[in-house]
Amino acid sequence: MSSKEQTSMFKKWKDPSNRSKLYINGEWIEAKGKNTLSVHNPATGEKIAEIASAGKEDVEYAIRSAREAFDNGVWRTTSAHERSRLLIEVAKKIEQNLEELAELEMINNGKTVREAQGDIEDAAKTFRFYAGLAIKSSEEILEVDNPFTSKVVREPIGVCGQIIPWNYPLLMASWKLAPALAAGNVCILKPSEVTPLTAIRLFELLDDVGFPPGVVNLIIGNGVNAGQPLTESYDVDKIAFTGGTATGKKIVETSVGNLKKVSLELGGKSPNIIFADCDYETALDYATFAIFNNAGQVCSAGSRLLVEKDIYDQFVQDLIEATKKIKVGNGKDPSSQMGPLVSEQHMNKVLNYISIGKEEGATIGCGGNRILKDGNHNGYFVEPTIFVDVDPNSTIAREEIFGPVLCVIPFETEREALRLANDTPYGLAAGIFTSNSEKADRMVKGLRAGVVWVNTYEQNLIEGPWGGYKESGIGRELGTYGFNEYTEVKQVIHSLHVEPSGWFS
Ligand code: NAP
């Protein structure tokens, strides 16, 4: 994108007369209450947009529009090939607008250019993957006794409320919209109020592609005003939520009225386990990547690093050296390797956890402070931080910090590593580094987590299931598993002999 084009893009976001609206029933509309919310660049603290903010009335209008679109069959009866074609068009539009979307993600979320571009590429891939699944028949014929046949079909659930967080704004929107639309559902997306910009741009692209009115709807606003009415509505058939575990529990409560389907992708405190027989350089590299990628704002971050005693001292020393070299800065600088935290509020939450760690007597290996130099005065930058010799029962070892803060814990035996790894209410992900495949296999079987990486970390594959054990969630996203979460199962039993049953005669 030329710098002239960039300037006009930012003018558009800043100009209140052009300010972005809600997308409901195929139209961009003002919020009924004329309320707005401000959006900031976390690298500078600067306000970058003023966005329409939905209230209950707007959410109700979105639900009515979606309900009508589902009930009149405008999307669910569209042929699978046509649904697939439109999803491929979305993927193409995302690819054609990659630079602009990455730029928006960077200025709104604080990601580095590399992180932002990777997310946008993955978002396009997600639409392509589900375009393929849309046309894959999932019909199943069962072997049953004569004179009956039994056919099992999957059908769309209906109106889906999709509520997403701020750490991967466009990618999370794609993980929600693509499988739901592929399966024939209609959607109401609610992004985080902190990071709505790429969702707005995505809906401009969806509008260009031309979905029937009411099939895709965007409401922006805070959790209580825009999210909760979706969860409470009897006209919403499913809530797909990604966010914190506390919010997820609340959503289960507020969704219970009509027993709508609820799938939850929640928080984590994932163990990354380094055995002495690992490939040392690989394990060291992934230990930093697992926690400092995306400034630690990753649900599956390897935030508890368990290191075998035999290599503990050397590994920790090398880890600290490597961490001190990470270049923290504004994502727009191509040399930045880690950006800021997403907001001032979130930065303060992370800094508070660092203070708690210190108060509880944990030893700081490196970092531990806000960065207020090199032109970063107004941004929300925090040093990559390592606590060493951490007590597994301390607050920082048990609670999700969701920032660049690593807790390193030593262990002596495989059994102890497994016990420490599973000693958490969460169960999203885990990593194991070892050159012993039998040991890896034993650990994989013992770990209570939805995703286990062996000799790698944070490889997310669209083709496979993503989700958590225990308090990390309910259900799975991605792959065929994610598609199935957006379907109801119907069995059709057909008699080939049309005759009375004779039961009462
Ligand atoms: P959050 O505070 O739980 O918010 C997530 C979304 O829920 C936001 O859109 C929020 O709106 C909305 N919300 C808040 N209260 C609500 C309510 N009562 N009813 C309906 N919606 C409500 O989480 P976050 O701070 O944005 O994201 C960080 C969390 O997400 C972490 O715990 C992380 O582990 C988790 N996460 C999990 C996965 C996964 O795949 N398992 C992936 C990414 C992130 P507003 O923020 O606009 O008010």
Image: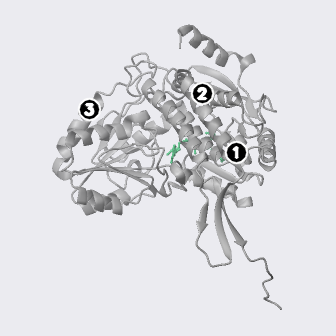
* Mark 1 to mark 2 CA distance (whole Å): 21 Å
Is 82 placed left or right of 348 in the picture? right
**Residue at image mark 2:** 93
Crowding at mark 1 (Cα within 10 Å: few <14, some 14-19, many 20+): few
Q: Is mark 1 within 8 Å of ligand 1?
A: no
Crowding at mark 3 (Cα within 10 Å: few <14, some 14-19, many 20+): some
Which is more toward the observer, 87 or 465? Answer: 87
Secondary structure beneath dot 1 equals: loop
The image quadrant where one finds the C terminus is: bottom right
Q: Amino acid at mark 3?
A: Ala
Q: Position of residue 485 (x, y in %)?
A: 60, 54
**Residue at image mark 1:** 79
Residue at 65% across / 36% down in the picture? Answer: 86
First reached walking from the N terminus: tag 1 or tag 3: 1
Q: Amino acid at mark 2?
A: Lys
Q: Position of residue 18 (x, y in %)?
A: 73, 18
Residue at 54% across / 37% down in the picture? Answer: 171
Q: Amino acid at mark 1?
A: Ser
Indicate which label's residue lies in the foreground, 2 or 3.
2
Q: Is mark 3 within 8 Å of ligand 1?
A: no
**Residue at image mark 3:** 322
First reached walking from the N terminus: tag 2 or tag 3: 2
